[in-house]
Amino acid sequence: MAAGFDLLAPHYRWMEWLLAGRKLQRCRTAFLGQLPQPRRTLLLGEGNGRFLAELLRRHPRTKFTCVDSSLRMLECLRIRLARLNLDTAAGEFVHADALDWSPPADRHDLIVSHFFLDCFRPDQLARLVPALARSAVPDARWLLADFCEPPVGWTRWRARAILWSMYLFFRAAARLPAARLTAPDDLLRHAGFALVERRSFDWGLLHSDLWSNAGNNSHKTAC
């Protein structure tokens, strides 16, 4: 998968703009204004750094760790932050496969996995989500933006067609392990997180989540 995303990295920004405009970025930043000051942030598959740039604008003192299997994506991320004159002295850039990387336990009060968990098969998610959850301190937040299949109606069939095309492309271009979308909700709940709020976009194709491990919160909306 890393080799595939290395090839896509220089083109990822214009591809996203052409296919989705600002929709994905709106999902990424939907809950950014509701976060308390994060002390340590873990970002998985941050890509070219569009979310991280906004995070650092709002919370320049946060210490962050970016983990990505694509070295070219990390390079694009560094270039974007440098062009925006954002301070990355408190940042760590880890070139690693998240499935093989072991995050330190009880360290992060913010975990960010935007458009990342959809890359993995169910068996891989069953390993990955608990490992990431163990890196969270009590009262941590988890931001997650991803695709979704609405339950009924024409929006469901629209989403199925888009998701089928998307997985077909990324499996060929980036050797994506997953062949279909797997919702991580049950794994997150089992790991001690509760859905605080979910916002849907683009007729239910996209959603943005705010999760927390601070008690048993009930979610406000559902996909």
Image (tube, grey):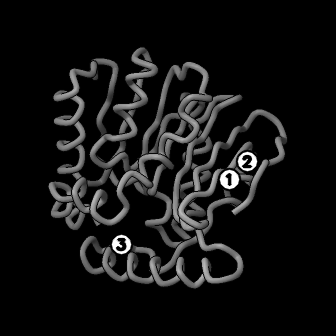
Alpha carbons under labels 2 and 3: distance apart: 27 Å
Q: Which mark is residue 176?
A: 3
Labelled pair 1, 2 in contact (Cβ < 8 Å): yes
Residue at position x 36%, y 44% in the image: 67
Can you give x and y, in whole percent of width and height, for residue 124 in the image?
51, 66
Mark in front: 1 vs 2: 2
Mark sitting on residue 195: 2
In depth, the one of 28 and 168 nearer the eye is 28
Q: Residue 56's image quarter?
A: top left
Mark 1 and mark 3 lie on one chain; the one further toward the N terminus is 3
Residue at horizontal 45%, vertical 75%? 178
The earlier-in-sequence mark between 2 and 3 is 3
- Choose the circle earlier in sequence order: 1 or 2: 1
The amino acid pointed to by label 1 is Leu
Element under disc 2: strand
Q: Which label belongs to residue 180? A: none
Q: Residues within 10 Å of mark 3 (few under 14, many from 20)?
A: many
The quarter of the picture where residue 19 lies is bottom left
The amino acid on which the numbered mark 3 sits, given as a three-letter code, is Leu
In the displayed structure, 36 sits above or below 24; it is above
Q: Which residue is mark 1?
A: 188
Residue in view at x 24 percent, y 40 percent:
77
